[in-house]
Image: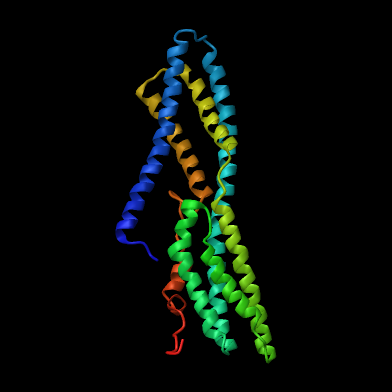
Amino acid sequence: MPKSGGGDAGNMVRDILISGGFVLGTVLLTWVIYFGMRLFVRDRVAPDTKDLAGSVIFRVAALHGLILGLVFAQELLDYNEIRADLVREATAVADIYNDMNRYGGDEVAAVQLALSDYVRQVVTVEWDRLGQQGRLSAEGWVFRETFYQSILNLSPNSPRQTDLRSHMVQNSQLIATLRQQRENTAIYHMGALFWIAALGGLVFVALPYFTFTPTPLHVALLSIYGAFSGLIMLMIYAFSNPFSPPGALAPTAFERLMETEIGVGPRRSPDL
């Protein structure tokens, strides 16, 4: 079900707070490291220390940027695949719904009703559940099993019906596959080793900057580095789980189906 205006505003505020916390946190971390090292080292800096520090900064920053860049690219790719899979699943649902109209027979209403219930379950229940618990609902599987079993029980009477039944069986199996992939994505979390490497790289890049005097311009430049690193880590975190904020996807493809006859479901006759 589409979100209300108030809900959208609340989600936007929440996303801004999460984003601001990431960026501000990394900026503060670079400040703590920089000023902490300045306080600890004091005047024990040799004349050639700045040259050595610059060399270390360059090498560690290159490795740190490479790690963040590779992980960012992979997470963005996975994020886009989930969005594409959602469209494929919604298309499979629509295909089955329309193929049942082409097939005809007594099972049309039962299959289409199960498909309509399935679409509503995904939009109104399962999507929030994936974000909060990382699990699909049992009801969603029941609706999928209902229309799948009904399709398997069809008895084609012509080559046309045989082809339609085969196509609907394939789409039903595809829906189950995409559902399972969606749940696997929801329970996936970035490993601790990545965050150790990401934050460790930030620390090891900021450490050698103690050789530069804390002028307002130097502190501002160091803050830019910390803010940009935090922004990249925020985006990696957001893309790693497309069902939770701040990078939560909306089930747009299924919401579109909700606006069609599929969302309403087949008209019931008075005896049903």
Q: Total number of numbered labels?
A: 0
Can see residue 224? no
Of residues 140 and 252, which is closer to you in this image? Answer: 140
Q: Check the image and report above or below for 232 versus 12.
A: above
Quarter assignment of residue 57: top right
Residue at the left extreme? 6
**Image position of 43 (left or right of 66):** left
| Whether residue 68 is situated above or below residue 7 in the rendered picture | above
Q: Please provide percent x and percent y for residue 34.
A: 44, 21
In the rendered image, the residue lying farthest to the bottom is 157
At which x and y percent is residue 188? 57, 48
Q: Which sits in the foreground, 222 or 85? A: 85
Residue at x-position 60% and y-position 33%: 63
Q: How is the image coloured?
A: rainbow
The quarter of the displayed image where residue 155 is located: bottom right
Where's residue 224, x and y in %? 42, 33
Give the image quarter of residue 173.
Answer: bottom right
Residue in the foreground of this view, choosing between 86 and 115: 115
At 57% across and 85% down in the image, what residue appears? 107
At x 37%, y 21%, the residue is 215
- As drawn, 103 above or below 234: below
Q: Position of residue 138 (x, y in %)?
A: 54, 63
Is 12 in front, or is 171? 171
* Observer able to see residue 264: yes
* Residue drawn at 45 percent across, 60 percent down: 250
Q: Quadrant of the N terminus?
A: bottom left
